[in-house]
Image: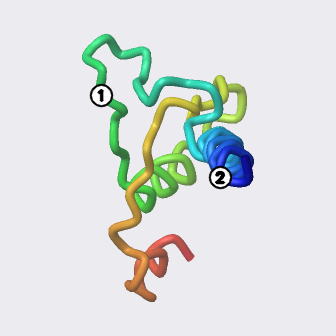
Amino acid sequence: MKTLWQLSGVAALALVLAGCFGNNGSNGTADNGNGMTPKVDFTTFVKNQINNPTVDRDPVSVNNKEFVFNDQDNEQAYNDLF
């Protein structure tokens, strides 16, 4: 009987942990139709947003983008902005 309780506890823990890892309820795909989440270079994305001075533009959707951080070790990555 003790083994049954242990297995039940492990199964419950596995279910709880499975709910902690994921994509906020999405299935990992974007709405672009090809089943792939688009990967976007974060530095390029930020620079494009800063260089666009239009005040009345629509907000940029970032929900279905997977950012890649190619410049995380580059201390000079944003020097040209300032």
Name the quadrant containing residue 26: top right
Residue 27 place in picture, x, y as percent:
48, 24
Q: Measuring 59% from the left and 42% from the top, which residue is drawn there? A: 18
Residue 62 place in picture, x, y as percent:
56, 36
Q: How many marks?
A: 2
C-alpha gap between disc 1 and disc 2? 42 Å
Front residue of this view, candidates 50 and 15: 15
Quickly name the residue at label 2: 3
Q: Nearer the viewer, mark 1 or mark 2?
A: 2
In the rendered structure, which disc, 1 or 2, sits on the residue that comes first in sequence?
Answer: 2
Front residue of this view, candidates 33 and 49: 33
Front residue of this view, candidates 21 and 55: 21
Indicate whether 43 appears above or below 17: below
Quickly name the residue at label 1: 36
Say which element carries label 1. loop
* Kind of residue sitting beneath label 1: Met
Say which element carries label 2. helix
Indicate whether 82 appears above or below 20: below
Quadrant containing the C terminus in the rendered view: bottom right
Indicate whether 20 appears above or below 55: below
Residue 70 place in picture, x, y as percent:
33, 68
Q: In the image as oriented, which residue stretches furthest toward the front?
A: 1
Is residue 6 shown left or right of residue 45? Answer: right
Q: Measuring 36% from the left and 32% from the top, which residue is drawn there? A: 37
